[in-house]
Image: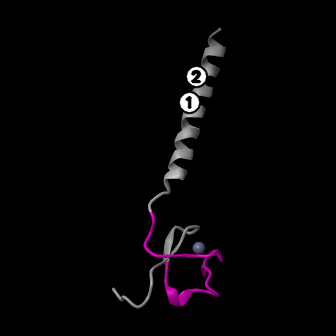
Amino acid sequence: MSAESPTLWCDTCDRSIDATALEDGNCPVCGNRVTTGKRQPLPWKFRLMIGATVVYLAWRLYQLIMWLSH
Ligand SMILES: [Zn+2]
């Protein structure tokens, strides 16, 4: 582990990027901007959005089943 080269992370590719492989500070694979620092866990807002979507879909499915059963 070298302390001189920072860890770069591409959120789009979901992979770490070698700092020397950057193209104009962008990801050499997808071309999007990469973030510096260690890999972040899934943002809690993203988790919340997924959770809300799941609950919403489950509620809609429940309504659909109730509607079909009548
Ligand atoms: Zn990328």
Amino acid identity at mark 2: Tyr
Residue range of the region highlighted in magenta in the rendering? 17-40
Residue to which mark 2 is pinned: 62
From the viewer's side, name the closer residue of 9 and 29. Answer: 9
From the viewer's perspective, tell me whether residue 69 is left or right of residue 2: right
What's the mark number on residue 58?
1
Q: Residue 4, relative to residue 42: is it above or below? A: below
Position of the N terminus by quadrant: bottom left
Q: Position of residue 8 (x, y in %)?
A: 49, 79
In-image side of 47 versus 3 (left or right): right
In the image, 64 versus 49, the foreground residue is 49
Q: Is residue 41 above or below residue 21?
A: above
Q: Quadrant of ligand 1?
A: bottom right
Please identify the residue farthest to the front as the structure is shown: 45
The question of residue 32 being in magenta is answered with yes
Q: CA distance from mark 2 to mark 1?
A: 6 Å
Residue located at (57% from left, 46% from top): 49
What's under tag 1, amino acid-wise? Ala
